[in-house]
Amino acid sequence: MKLTFTENAMQRLGKLGMAEEISLYMSTIYGCGGPDSSMFTIRAYDTENPYYDTVLDTNFGTVRVTRDSLQQLDEDNIIDFNDSSFSFVLKSNRGLLNPNMNYENMKLKD
């Protein structure tokens, strides 16, 4: 499995103060059980989360994920940033997986 960040996505994450300790958090939409019932969030500094159990090597460093969430991804995945909608986009060879990814800097949560 491959996860690549575009240059635009890496620059935006840097501007948001989210250039380190990146994780890909998956939340499930309740009431839906299909393959499209999950949404990914880019998180920085989510080090207290005990559910991450694997790491992906990317061009932006290592990204922590849960093994279960890998089922929702394809073999080749890209995280981009869309300037016109001001949103991160997760796409793969089958198309858009998440056209408007949330992002959270966990340092700012408390």
Image (spheres, rainbow, N blue to C red):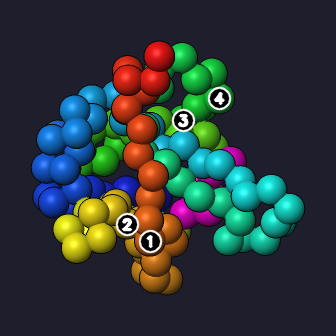
Mark in the foreground, 2 or 4: 2
Classify mark 4: helix, strand or loop. loop
Determine crowd level at label 1: few under 14, some 14-19, many 20+ residues with C-alpha closer than 10 A: some
- On screen, residue 59 versus residue 38, left or right, reads left
Checking the image for residue 99, the label placed there is 1
Q: Earlier in the sequence, mark 4 or mark 1?
A: 4
**Could you tell me if residue 19 is visible in this image?**
no
Circles 2 and 1, Cβ within 8 Å, touching? The answer is yes
State how far apart marks 4 and 1 are (Cα). 25 Å
Amino acid under disc 4: Tyr
Determine crowd level at label 3: few under 14, some 14-19, many 20+ residues with C-alpha closer than 10 A: few
State how far apart marks 3 and 4 are (Cα). 9 Å
Q: Which residue is mark 4?
A: 51
Image quarter of residue 22: top left
Single out the residue that lies furthest toward the bottom. Answer: 94
| Residue 99 magenta | no
Look at the image and give the residue range highlighted in magenta.
68-73
State how far apart marks 2 and 1 are (Cα). 5 Å
Determine crowd level at label 4: few under 14, some 14-19, many 20+ residues with C-alpha closer than 10 A: few
